[in-house]
Image (cartoon, rainbow, N blue to C red):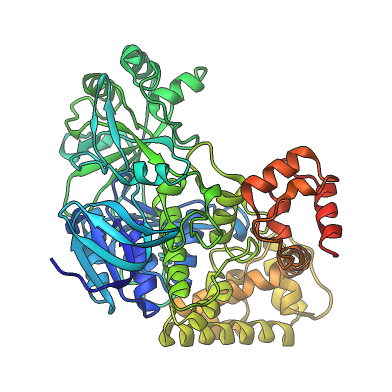
Amino acid sequence: MYFEPYDIIVVGAGHAGCEAAAAAANMGSKVLLITMDLRLMASMSCNPAMGGIAKGQIVREIDAMGGYSGIVSDRTMIQFRMLNKSKGPAMWSPRCQSDKMMFSAEWRSMLEKTTNLDFWQDTVTGLMVKGDQVKGVKTMMGGEIESKAVILTNGTFLNGLIHIGEQNFPGGRMGEVAVHGISEQLKEAGFEVKRLKTGTPVRIDGRTIDFSKLIEQKGDDEVVGFSYTEPFKIQKQRSCWIAHTSLKVHETLRKGFKYSPMFNGRIQGVGPRYCPSIEDKIERFSGKDSHQLFVEPEGWTTEEYYLNGFSSSLPDYIQYEALRQIEGFENAKIFRPGYAIEYDYFPPEQLYHSLETRLAHGLYFAGQINGTTGYEEAACQGMMAGINASLAVQDKEPLVLNRYEAYIGVLIDDLITKGVDEPYRMFTSRAEHRILLRQDNADARLTEKSYKLGLAKEYRYRKFMEKQQKVEEIKAFFSDNYVYPDQINGLLERNGSTLIDQKLKLSYILLRPQLSLKDLIETLPTLEIYKTKNRFLNECLEEAEIQIKYDSYIQKENELAEKLARLENVRLPKDFDFHTIQSLSYESREKLNRYHPETLGQASRISGISPADINVLAIFLGR
């Protein structure tokens, strides 16, 4: 098979690979996406859901940047919930259950409609390298395909090993072969390679579950969705359900511990702290009599259910016996058992913030290959790798998002400056500027950047500008108009708020924590114009309310971000030997030489480097 040279080859069509291919192609690069199975693009190999705590913010950021994850999630969702609504807006996080088969099919459909993008079903077994420059890939079918850049998004497939009890066998996912050759080649070239593990629970036949014994968890009445650009269309939702383990379940699971690859040492990789297996949970939290489980449907037309919280690598008969002791699952049948999988990853300190590797020019890593876990974390890395590979091909400077600009920036900076010793998962607590990084304002933070890159298209930018204008109009209305005591005191009394004795600006009244914009709209005739079910106007009202209520906090956070941004603008010499600066602590010299931060800001976030060391560097740089 003869292939013309490509600008960029993307290896793997998981969430990272799909976003990488879409971003690079939409920026005008000639892209080839190679995957082992074209039917499984962006496969939801674990739970059938997108978003969640901090992850929902990432999906909205991807959408604001012109990526596809938000659109695909909206088109294929079967339930939507906005999490953490009882907390402040910085914590609100959208999440949806997805139809996993529709999700994969919709991704393929969108990619096939993307210009500049070709597809090839094959297995990449190695890279073509000349000196320190990647020149393309080699495939199992004997192909040698040339390119200017390669993005590896291999997920759990690199030397993947599946464990079920005492059984283990090679595989990237259940029923799919592992990939050999790439890790070995890169290790020989000087890359550090390590092992991680992850797991997945049993899949259950919903026809055999007694839902009357479970707690129903319905979706929100108001469905917001993820994408800023597409009108939302879902008319009905499927419920999720909550179940609980018991001491009897735990006792049954413990019977299999002696066969557990996790406890007897057969699994060497470290598993995810925040998504542990059920055996890990009952061992780590031995004082708990019960653990909560979420029973999640996998689609509109299937009876397959995902048992979130019951991930396991115990023998299949132990999993089955324990499952049937959970209330509501006494007669349950399963489609397949849970399993653990070990796989290779490359410690991300070996990357620049562009996600290009330090040892090989033109080679980019994205997704689980960098030690992360989660569809959303993978997708945003893929998008950034696709953007930066395309910029490099065009001889342009890379795009690096700062920590105060996006959760994406927090994630990539954490990976490169701190590394990982367990699968990395994003949380709101990882972002020091989370009041600036809300799910509602991702478009305001990122759309203009993407538009200038040529990634966000004209209609996205027009929609964004229209929203910004409307938000400012609403804020101006609330700043320019007054409310009188006889109009508002009844509402204030009902909500336990201090009465007023003179007219006050609407914006001043809205600052009161006991009141919401919705309360004012329902009470004041002057706000009748804002009574609407229009999604666009509701988004603008929500954004305006947040900006008015939290204005002082947002201003303080912006001031802090501006101060920290100064450190980000101070660049450190490339490939500098920090051992020559004797006034730095020995630990700092070692770590600076290991991580080679690009800026003073990045250096300040490396564990073990003190503020005194940062001052020494600043003086050394003449700052």
Image point (56%, 48%), residue name: 349
Q: Position of residue 333 (x, y in %)?
A: 16, 30
As rendered, which of 606 and 2 lies closer to the eye?
A: 2
Say whether residue 27 is left or right of residue 398.
Answer: left
Q: Extreme left residue here?
A: 1
Q: Is residue 522 visible?
A: no
Say whether residue 314 is left or right of residue 27.
Answer: left
Task: Look at the picture and state if 566 lies above or below 300.
Answer: below
The C terminus lies in quadrant: bottom right
Q: How many marks?
A: 0
As rendered, which of 134 and 256 lies closer to the eye?
A: 134
Q: Is residue 424 visible?
A: yes
Image point (29%, 67%), residue name: 146
Q: Position of residue 9 (x, y in %)?
A: 32, 65
Task: Look at the picture and state if 80 lies above or below 549.
Answer: above
Q: Position of residue 32 (x, y in %)?
A: 27, 68
Image point (71%, 53%), residue name: 603
Task: Tell me where residue 398 sits by quadrant.
Answer: bottom right
Task: Look at the picture and state if 221 lies above or below 246.
Answer: below
As rendered, which of 379 and 37 lies closer to the eye?
A: 37
Image point (83%, 78%), residue name: 502
Q: Position of residue 410 (x, y in %)?
A: 59, 56
As rendered, which of 432 and 250 lies closer to the eye?
A: 432
Say whether residue 163 is left or right of residue 148.
Answer: left
The N terminus lies in quadrant: bottom left
Say whether residue 614 is left or right of residue 107.
Answer: right
